[in-house]
Image (cartoon, grey):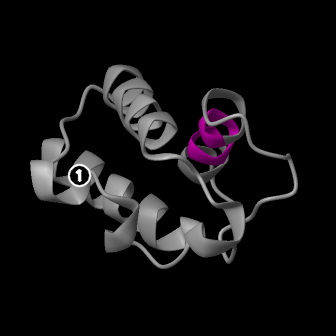
């Protein structure tokens, strides 16, 4: 994993109160994250990376895996820079 991927997974584990054995291929169905925890993760990512999510991309249903979510965040960061 690159630095951004590691930071996002770390935030997901800490803020989302998840076990530390998640990876990019872990599905959101497997981790069963609560929507409020997911929004909290998004807010932390926005603050840490100075980005902003589109409202429609704030739902776990938009992402099959953690890797899909990470790719979305990386794309936002690239656009910002």
Residue under the image location 61 percent in, 38 percent down:
7
Q: Which quadrant: the N terminus? A: bottom right
Q: Is residue 55 left or right of residue 41?
A: left
* Residue 68 makes an appearance in the image: yes
Q: Which residue is mark 1?
A: 76
**Where is residue 34 drawn, in percent x and y?**
53, 46
Picture quadrant of residue 50? top left
Secondary structure beneath label 1: helix
Majority SS type along the magenta span: helix
* Residue 27 makes an appearance in the image: no
In the image, residue 74 above or below residue 26: above
**Where is residue 72 drawn, in percent x and y?**
33, 63
The magenta stretch is 7-12
In the image, residue 70 above or below residue 7: below
Q: Is residue 11 left or right of residue 37?
A: right
Q: Is residue 2 left or right of residue 4?
A: right
**Where is residue 74 drawn, in percent x and y?**
37, 56
Residue under the image location 36 percent in, 70 percent down:
61
- Report the residue that reaches farthest toward the top: 47
Q: How busy is the neighbourhood of tag 1: few (under 14 within 10 Å), some, or many (20 plus)? A: some
Picture quadrant of residue 69? bottom left
């Amino acid at each position: 994993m690159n630095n951004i991927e590691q930071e996002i997974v770390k935030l997901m584990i800490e803020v989302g109160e998840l076990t530390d054995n998640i990876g990019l291929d872990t599905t959101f169905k497997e981790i069963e994250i609560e929507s409020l925890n997911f929004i909290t993760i998004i807010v932390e990512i926005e603050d840490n990376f100075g980005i902003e999510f589109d409202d429609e991309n704030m739902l776990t249903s938009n992402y099959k895996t953690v890797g899909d979510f990470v790719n979305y965040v990386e794309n936002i960061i690239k656009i910002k820079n």
